[in-house]
Every structure is written in structure tokens, then in C-alpha cells.
Amino acid sequence: MQTADEYDLVVLGSGAAGLAAALAGREHGLSTLILEKSAKLGGGTTNSYGLLWFGRNHLAADAGYSDSREETLEYMRFLAGGEAITANFDAFVDRSPDALRFFESCGVPFRIVRGVRDHYFGVAPGAKEEGRSLEVDLVSGYDLGQWRDRVRMSSVQPCYITAEEQIKWGGVNRAAQWDSELVRTRQDADMRGKGVGLVCQLLKCLLARGVQIETSCVADQLLREGDRVTGIIAGDRRILARQGVLLATGGYESNDALVRAYEGLPDWMSQVPTSVTGDGLILGMEAGGAVHTLRNNMQLFLGFGIPVEEGQEPEFHLAGIVELCSPHTMVVNAAGARFADEAYFQGIIPSLRHFDVLQHAYPNLPCFLIFDQQYASRYSFAGQPAGQVPQWVARADDLPSLAAKLGIEPDGLSTTASRFNAHVRTGADPDFRRGELTWRLAHDGDMPAGLNQSLGTIEQPPFYGIELRPSGASSAGLLTNADAQVLSSRGQPIKGLYATGNTAARTEMGAGYQAGYTLASNLTFGYLAARHMAGQQAR
């Protein structure tokens, strides 16, 4: 065993959660080391749209938006569904605006994303039409110097435009309407936004401060002295942490055994890198940390895998916020029946989890995306330009033939399509009320105002279909307190051990999901963990 290196703070993981905690630690005077298991930085954050949700934030106030603590509380209580832990919930409500100001003061530039409503605007008390969703400004990869090519880049997220631009230019499903000249200019300058941009902005600040970062380094176990975590063992190295080890390795979405244990749904496909296998969760459990599971985790999505060449990392495309929101699509089960409002991905979740006690099976898994040439001609599929549907997508000149290729009951699919088309012509969906909720990132900018943006007939051949797979963020994580300290099964803090991001259970938000919650929580509790460690150091 080599002689031990020693730092105040050792961070495991380099997604937004780990990088934010490291930056906060360095700003609070802690010598800091970041260790990343993969060869590239960024983790699952690089797959995200990069939205951050901050109630009553100062940027919104400066821009003239009205918000209050009580409205934020009302909305978050609604989303939590009774599953939040009060101390952590309150910490997020009250300290997230402070965290936003702190990271802005460190040099991370944030801006309001106009055009994004709270998910339950018009439904939940305290919901706002605009002002709470933020994103970072674009940053050039060239600003990172030798680290430019050491950040993970997602092939399914166009990071060279902002989320606001993408929405303003017609939605995430209308790539053909984007400003092509501006896109080329941005690509030439290697401009990065969304989740990749957030990682790069945090990394840029860390590099400017000389924080040490190592990749391809796996933490094998935690070091302990008595009741305190004092560092890690990585291969033949001992790395000591005077104030704390912070676990920010993400969830376990790419660990089949843990997915079976905590999610239980068949045909799961990970939406995050293959390196996200629950390392932090396992290390925390080995140190005596308690595991907390959300009973009604609303971070469950439908999507499909994009074929890659042998040796490349799998790519998962989230269909729920692109294809399923668009006209001329529907989702059916193997019987050919629709079972939910496709345009509102959270509305699908209870039907996916439904278990039929007589069939002793999940009747709505597997399920399938069905669309026609009307969709293919006008909208983006799997990130491709309009009019280009990849050859690996099943197609046929009639619905019964398509059903046979996909393993769907042919008569059921034909009957469902006929009923769906009849409803579309009336402008409403009495079966599942598709399109009545207003939140979406995809829309039909060509459709006259007042018409349902999500409805369109499925009747023009060829017809297309692909099996959808469930995916999402981990339902289980380490139980932590309001300072991000990992708690034991007896509810006591484990000294020197902290967890943030998806490694920690989402006790501050409970069952609810709101785009931007997770990344805002990453920044908030990384900030709070660093403050706590700095306070411990001072004492």
C-alpha cells in the first residue's frame, strides 16, 4: 500500500453533484480531490437537458417575476405527495436560493429559461408559468484547455443550443426549424450548453482554482477509524479525508442487480452511462448507511435504445418529452390498446407499474410507440432531421402488418387507431385527455392557436413502430440529513461521510418530479455539505 495522500475533502463522482460540492468545498477553504471512475467527466448529468429549478430565485425577482416562499412551499408540498422528509424539504426550500447566488458568485452564469412552465401549472397551488426554470450560459470546450476532450459528450442531446432556444425555435421535435447557420457557428466554436454545459461551467471554475481531478480511479472501500469515515482505498492507494468523503457517484441505473432489487419493472434500460452502477450506494451501505426508497418515484420515463457500433456506449433516447408529446403518435400495449395520456410522461407512470393479479404480469409492458408518415415528414425522430426515420425502426404499409412485426395483437391495434383518429377529428381525447395539461418541451408551432397541440391522426402510410423501454432515476438512495450527512440505520450521522445527487435518497422532494429539481438539489446540498465540513474544520 502506497503512502497516503491527504485532503480535507475527497469527492467521488464528477457529475454536477460532485463538481458542485468540490467547488463549494474549495471556496470554503477545503483542500479538495475529485475522483471519477470513468475515463471522462460528467456522468449522467451530460445526458440531461440541464434545467435547474429554483423557487423564488433572485434572477426571477430581478426580471420582474412574482414568487414567494409560501407559493414555493405549496407547489413543492403538492409534488412531494407526503414522501418528503421535513428537515431536508425545508433545507431545499430555504437554502436553494442561497446556493444559486453562491455558485453564481463563483463564476457560473445562470439565466432564466423562458417558455418553460412548472409541470403542474394550472393544476397545483403555487405553480408558476415562468421564472423558476434556469440553465447555464453556453461555454466553449476550448475554455477547458487539456480537459476539453475529457468531458463526456452525449450523442442524443444537441448541447450547442440552449433549452430556451430549442423551445423558441419550435420545440425539441422540430430540428428542421432551428437556425442552421447559428448551429454551425456554435459547433465550430465547440459551444456547450444543457447538462454538458453545466458540467463544463463547474469544471472551468474548478480548473481556475487548481482543484485536483483524477479520472479512471475506482474507490474500492471507505477507510474508517472508530465511528468516523477517514478516507478511501483506491487500488493500492490510501487517500485520507480530514473533513469528509462525499459520495456523488450517481444512482444504480446501470446495475442490473440493484435495478431488480429496487425498481422491479421488466425490460429496464439505463438512460445513464454504463459506469453508473451504484458504487456510492454500496460504499455507503458497507459503512452502515441506511437506504431509503421512494414508494412513488415519479422519475420514470419511456424511451428506446439507439443502435451503436460494437464497443460504443449504449445510447437511450427519451421519447416521453419528444415523440410522445407530438401529434400523429400514440403508445399501445401488446394487446394494441392505449393506456394513458402519452403527452404527459408522468401520467403514464401508474399504468406502467400496474400489476394484473389475474394475469400475474404487467399488462402495459412491453409497450410500443406507433406513428405514421405525417409525423415522420414533419418532426424529428431520435434526433434525426424531419423525414429521416432510421432503418432499424419497424415499418409497414398497414397497421396489421406493423403489429405482426412488433408482436402486437393486430385487430387490437387497428381498432385502437380507428377510435383514436375519430377522437382526434373532434379535437379532444375523452379516453385519456391527452394534451389538456400544458407542460411540454415539444409542440406544433404550425397548429392554429386554441387547438390541441398533441393530437394528430395516425392514418397515412407507411406506419412505424418501436418498442419502448422503462427507465428513470433511482428510487432508492442513502438516507441523509439536511447537511447531506449519511445517516445510519439508527438515524445518526456517520461522521465524515456525505452523499448528494442520485446517490442520496431524494427526501427533499419526495415522490414528485419537476424538471430541474435534481440539478438544483445537487447544487444546494453540495453547498450545504461543504459549509458543514468547513464548520467542523473550524471547530
Image: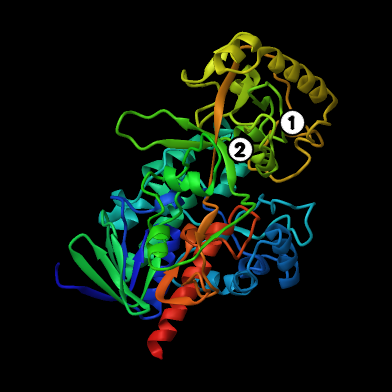
Identify the image quadrant of residue 534: bottom left
- Label 2 crowding class (10 Å Cα cut-off): few <14, some 14-19, many 20+? many
Front one among 476 and 113: 476
Residue 508 versus residue 221: which sits nearer the camera? Answer: 221
Q: Percent from the top left, x then y, of residue 509?
A: 62, 62
Distance between the Cα atoms at labels 1 and 2? 20 Å
Q: Residue at x 54, y 73 (%)?
A: 481
The residue carrying mark 2 is 320
Q: Position of residue 309 (x, y in %)?
A: 33, 28
Residue 317 in picture, x, y percent from top left: 50, 36
Q: Residue at x 34, y 53 (%)?
A: 41
Q: How is the image coloured?
A: rainbow
* Residue 77: % across, % down: 72, 63
Decide if residue 532 is on the left or right side of residue 151: right
Within 10 Å of disc 1 (Cα), the crowding (few <14, some 14-19, many 20+) is few
Secondary structure at badge 2 equals loop
Q: Secondary structure at mark 1?
A: loop
Instruction: Name the residue carrying label 1.
Output: 447
